[in-house]
Amino acid sequence: MVVPIPAALNQNSFDVRWYTLRRPASPDAPACWRKWLLDSGSLTQRLIQASKGDFRVEVVRQLWGRPTRSEARELGIPHRQMALIREVQLIGNGQPWVFARTIIPASTLTGKQRELNYLGSRSLGTVLFKDPTMQRGALQISKLRLLSGETVWARRSRFLLSGKPLLVAEVFLPALQKVNYLNNGITESQ
C-alpha cells in the first residue's frame, strides 16, 4: 500500500544531517540506490526512461514558508526568511516514485527565474537542465524517517541559476525500489 506523501513526510523530516558524497563507491548508501543517489544528470529523464514514458509530476503544494534550519544554512539565507517551497510527487507507472522538495529564496525569483513561480505540473528539471547558466553543487545524501517509521534514502543539492540559489531535495520512495530491483537484476535479498 502506498502512503500518500503528505501524510508520510513533513517539514521536520528534512531537518536532518546531510552527508556530502565524496566518492562513487561510498559505503554510506546501499548498492541498489547508489546510481540514483550519485547521478548528477536529470532525475526527470531517468524516471521517464524507467517508466517507459508513463511519467507525470503532481504538485502536492506550493506556498511561501520558512525553510528548515538545514535548508536555510545550505542556501546561505537567514532561517526566518520566507522562501517559495514547492513539493511534488514524481509519478511513474501510476505510483509515486520520488517526492521532491524545492526551496527557492525570493531573491532568486527575479529576472528570467520568475518562471519558477509558474511551473505547475512541469518538472523543475526541464527548466534547470536547459538553462546554460545552471551550476550544480555537491550531492548530499541522508536517510529520512517517514511518519510511519519506515526509512527512505534522499539526496539534495544546491543549484545556481544565473548565480541565484535554490535547493532541491529528492526522496526515493519504496515503490521505486521495486523498479530499481527489476531494472538492475537485483533480488530483494541482496
Image (cartoon, grey):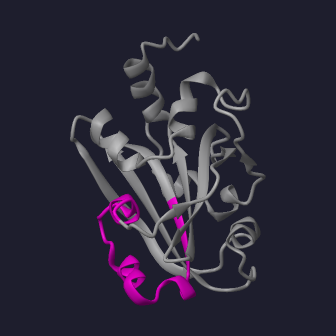
Q: Residue 53: x and y, percent?
A: 21, 41
Q: Is residue 33 visible?
A: yes
- Give left or right: position of 103 versus 27: left
The stretch of residues the image draws in magenta is 101-130
Q: Is residue 95 visible?
A: no
Q: Residue 148: x and y, percent?
A: 62, 43
Q: Nearer the viewer, residue 17 or 76?
A: 76
Q: Nearer the viewer, residue 136 or 70?
A: 136
Residue at 71% from the left image edge and 73% from the top image edge: 72
Image quadrant where residue 47 sits: top left
Residue at 60% from the left image edge and 54% from the top image edge: 156
Residue at 73% from the left image edge and 84% from the top image edge: 80
* In the depicted structure, whether residue 176 falls above or below residue 81: above
Q: Residue furthest front?
A: 132
Q: Residue 23: x and y, percent?
A: 69, 34
* In the depicted structure, whether residue 115 falls above or below residue 152: below
Q: Residue 157: x and y, percent?
A: 60, 57
Tell me, yes or no, whether the highlighted magenta stretch contains residue 122: yes
- Give left or right: position of 82 versus 121: right
- Give left or right: position of 151 versus 160: right
For the N terminus, give its image quadrant.
top left
Tell me, yes or no, whether the highlighted magenta stretch contains residue 74: no
* In the depicted structure, whether residue 152 falls above or below residue 132: above
For the C terminus, give its image quadrant.
top right
* In the depicted structure, whether residue 124 falls above or below residue 21: below
Q: Residue furthest left?
A: 53
Residue at 58% from the left image edge and 31% from the top image edge: 34
